[in-house]
Image (spheres, rainbow, N blue to C red):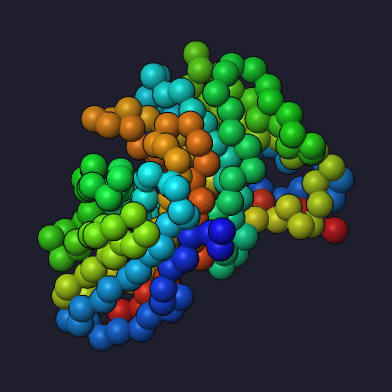
Amino acid sequence: QKEVEQNSGPLSVPEGAIASLNCTYSDRGSQSFFWYRQYSGKSPELIMSIYSNGDKEDGRFTAQLNKASQYVSLLIRDSQPSDSATYLCAVNMNTGGFKTIFGAGTRLFVKA
Amino acid sequence: DAGVIQSPRHEVTEMGQEVTLRCKPISGHDYLFWYRQTMMRGLELLIYFNNNVPIDDSGMPEDRFSAKMPNASFSTLKIQPSEPRDSAVYFCASSWDNRGTEAFFGQGTRLTVV
């Protein structure tokens, strides 16, 4: 099992719809979780971090964490074409020292 | 602050040549990370430093790869000799800690080994 797993997509949604991105992780002791957005040819940039079970909202973005299920998700409401990018799930794990491990990313396309 | 600065942005080299990638982290950040990104393997952590000291290099693929951080404002990743399978985008990132804070990424170096 990979340490951080994501569906590679592509995920295609119409403009104005909700995009739902999912991620599972292997280390039950993980405490810090992040969503990065990466536009084509650019570097990753942080859009959300979450540390406690439940939901965390920031504008059109909501991160959801369920540690019992080892599952973290990102919802993007009112999706815009400018949201088209690859979304990377990242989990800080203690694997003989703390490291942030990235998933392979999910490509999102928002159709105008 | 200008953010994490990497150089060069693009590098094309012949197989067998030495390649050196450079990184200047954000001032005040105690942690520096080197990542490699490919389509097949995604974003992989190669090595990270805390206060200029290498902490975990378990992600370095082979002895051909080496990294140094001689001071708080400069780090290098060297590949010698380079091989075509080293072709990737190499990112440097820095952060205040290694647990719960954001890592800021540089613009990356796109390496092509022919």
Specify the quadrant that holds the N terminus of chain A.
top left
Q: Residue at x 64, y 25 (%)?
A: A64
Q: Is residue A97 above or below residue A78?
A: above
Residue A41 shows up from this direction: yes
Give how far across and how far down residue B37 sits, in percent: 41, 59
- Taking depth in this image into account, of A55 and B26 the one nearest to the observer is B26
Q: Is residue A74 above or below residue B88?
A: above
Q: Residue at x 48, y 31 (%)?
A: B100
Q: Residue at x 59, y 33 (%)?
A: A49
Seen in the image, is B44 located left or right of residue B96?
left
* Quarter holding residue B110: bottom left
- Taking depth in this image into account, of A104 and B111 the one nearest to the observer is B111
Seen in the image, is B82 located left or right of residue A40?
left
Q: Residue at x 30, y 84 (%)?
A: B13
Give how far across and how far down residue A86 sits, in percent: 60, 53
* Quarter holding residue B82: bottom left
Residue A103 shows up from this direction: no
Specify the quadrant that holds the C terminus of chain A.
bottom right
Seen in the image, is A25 located left or right of residue B86?
right
Give how far across and how far down residue B9 sits, in percent: 46, 75
Give how far across and how far down residue B86 sits, in percent: 29, 69
